Image (cartoon, helix red, strand yellow):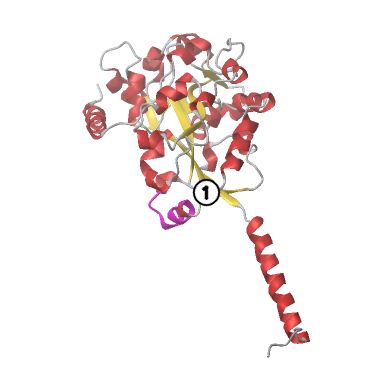
Amino acid sequence: MFKKYPTRRQFLNYGKLSLLILLNSCSNSLKKIKISFQSSLYPKSFKDTFPRILQQENINFSKNKSEKNKIKLSKSDFILINDGWLDSINFENFQNIKNIFSNDLLDNRSIDLLNSFKEYQRNKLFPIGVVPYAVIIKNNKDLIYDARKSWDFLLAEKLKGKIIFPQSPRIMVSISKKISKKNSLSKLKAQSMLFEDKNSINWLINSHASVAIIPFSLCEKYLRFDSRLSVVFPNNGVPLMWNFLLTKSKMNNRILVDWIKSLEKRATIDKLANQGWYLPFKNQFSQSKYNIKIASNYDGPSKKCWENSWSLPPLNNEEKLNLENMWNQSLTP
């Protein structure tokens, strides 16, 4: 027959087991949810919006084949990535995010960009920020007027060998198409000092360079303390760098919804725009940041500039080959 009551030893063992179950339950409930992104590309005002439950993982998408990055990506619940690195991820690893956020939240510019992706891709992408490229001019305030009118100013003789361009043939080609001179791509390449992304602002400050073309969010803070620097956004538009959110987990939708909702606070929108990060949401206050009038050297793009700015939608294989050939065939004049 079974004993009606447990022995003292059994009672203690039951207590130990219950405690272990409780501790394990608490541990799982407090487990951080991971978000991976390349930290150096995001302004502090944006990173400050992350919910505390998110554990931030810094990842360099240019080294996506490294074992360390693969491990980080495999363990991430969410990732943030800009449009230049989308080819480095496998969309099959992510959930549809369209089920969480409807297009009613997004403005026309972001919806147009999403429509340029294949359906299985756009259903998994949520545009969370757009950053305009800026022209930073050092010690040449006389260039500001011409630079504000158009990109033609880049071909000025005084700038030969003094321009730091983005390390992106596609951005270079897109800018060359905005210049009215013949063989503009070849002429632009002849004006270059170097092609750089990560350290372009440091090169500009610490070299004989006069101009650098940089995402606004990566250079805005330098404008506040270096009086030699001026920022210009040509009226015929600038390239736009888009940033997307992707999710791997269906279990954490509430976190995403609450986070995105928090971004729509006026104070948050102000802080983000002041650091060169613009929300592609259609609410009125977000859209007001695209309609400013230039009042100082620290303002963002004018309404006219935004209207003429362009995104870089995904390329098919033929377009990639044509771009590569165009770049390789653009000989220095």
Name the residue: 58% across, 18% down: 289
Looking at the rendered structure, the kind of residue marked 1 is Asp
Q: Locate the C terminus and report the quarter of the image it occupies.
A: top left
Q: Is residue 52 above or below residue 287?
A: below
Name the residue: 61% across, 29% down: 221
Q: Which residues are magenta?
A: 64-73
- Crowd around label 1: few <14 · some 14–19 · many ≥20 (10 Å): many
Q: Give the image quarter of residue 47.
A: top right
- Which residue lies most toward the right here? 8
251 on left or right of 265: left
Instruction: Judge whether residue 66 is colored magenta.
Output: yes
Tally of numbered tags: 1
Q: Is residue 184 above or below residue 218?
A: above
Which SS class for mark 1?
loop
Q: Locate the N terminus and report the quarter of the image it occupies.
A: bottom right
Q: Is residue 69 above or below residue 170?
A: below
Q: Which residue is mark 1?
A: 77
